[in-house]
Image (cartoon, helix red, strand yellow):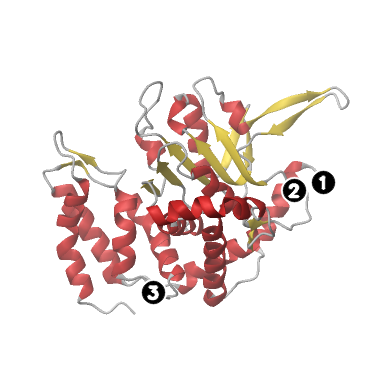
Amino acid sequence: MNWDSAMQAQQDETRNMPDGSLEDAIGVLQRLRDVMRGQVIGRDDVIELVIIALIADGHVLLEDFPGSGKTTLAKALGDAIGDDREIEHFIAPFRRIQFTPDLLPSDVTGVPVFDSASNAFHFRHGPIFAHVVLADEINRTSPKVQAAMLEAMGEKQVTVDNVTYPLDELFFVIATQNPLDLVGTYPLPVPQLDRFLFKISMEHIDRKSELEVLETWQSRRDGARGDPAVTRDELLASRAAIDRGVAIAEVVKTTLVDISRRLRADERVLQGNSTRSLVLMLPALQAAAALRGRNFVSAEDIELLLPRVLGHRIELAPGVADLNRILHDNMREPMERLAGSTLD
């Protein structure tokens, strides 16, 4: 089976996948969370956000410092996902791309290679062809490479020599950038930032968790390559079940719009968030509710996710730095109205 036929078979299989129940989906999410918690210590909040983004078909940008556990987090997620399909395919569970100034787009997407035996060119797939991709120090590479990533993240496809190659339906990017080192970096443009559902700042873990990391490093290392906790098909079925089974009340949508409009009118905000960001937030709110065992979106979900979704999409006026205060001021009244309503 050639590559085009294999990818078409994957897409047909995804469309024909049997529907799962919301209860099954909640079980899949909780199972994935438990396995990742066993490998990544002291990052329960980040693990939940990563799982929410995965189910919401988004991507995550981590601002961190070296040695904060980003590779462990991404690899734990990739190792927890199995793919038992029998058709020929070129998708790995996890791949890591180290971005550098001299990186070329073909180093990420792949390149046609001439095969003398067949006297024809064949596409050699790049590391972007994976379920989970760790894009390490993404702001260290050139805008040309960033543009190649933008197509992959936004369209789930890559284009090489005017030929388009689809990525898998389950495609998730965890990108990192170091906020402390500005030498030799290329700031991410607004369109690239907008491809990330969440931007998360990873702080140092607490003392108890840091001690646990040291005490359990051998057991976590030896158990890192156990059986996958969930399968690709289970995750895609869970995504569909959550989309159908978790209700979003009209008052929730009204609250999101009211907060956004207040932010845009705030004199401390130079540019507010787009309507597109609110649309992207809806499946994330559904996933957050499911991860907590609910079949409806609540005020708790908005309070958890809204700063993560809007934080990198809002441009503050010159001299203004306290984004959290601005978000709190503009969320207060709409959230109070939401608290007084019935959601379920």
Q: Secondary structure at mark 2?
A: helix
Q: Position of residue 150 (x, y in %)?
A: 48, 37
Using a 10 Å C-alpha cutoff, classify the residue at mark 1 as few (fewer than 14 neighbours), some (14 to 19) or many (20 or more): few
Q: Nearer the viewer, mark 2 or mark 3?
A: 3
Q: Secondary structure at mark 1?
A: loop
Q: Secondary structure at mark 3?
A: loop
Circle nearer the N terminus (3, 1):
1
Residue type indicated by callout 3:
Phe
Residue holding disc 3: 296
Residue holding disc 2: 6
Which sits in the foreground, 203 or 275?
A: 203
Residue sitting at x 13%, y 34%: 319
Tell me, yes or no, if residue 65 can be seen here. Answer: yes
Q: Position of residue 127 (x, y in %)?
A: 63, 36
Location of residue 18 by image quarter: bottom right
Using a 10 Å C-alpha cutoff, classify the residue at mark 2 as few (fewer than 14 neighbours), some (14 to 19) or many (20 or more): some
The numbered disc on residue 1 is 1
Q: Are marks 3 and 1 in contact (CB under 8 Å)?
A: no
Residue type indicated by callout 1:
Met
Q: Are marks 1 and 2 in contact (CB under 8 Å)?
A: yes
Circle nearer the N terminus (1, 2):
1
Location of residue 343 by image quarter: bottom left
Label 1, label 2: how many angstroms apart (C-alpha)? Answer: 6 Å
Label 3, label 1: how many angstroms apart (C-alpha)? Answer: 43 Å
Which sits in the foreground, 321 or 70?
A: 70
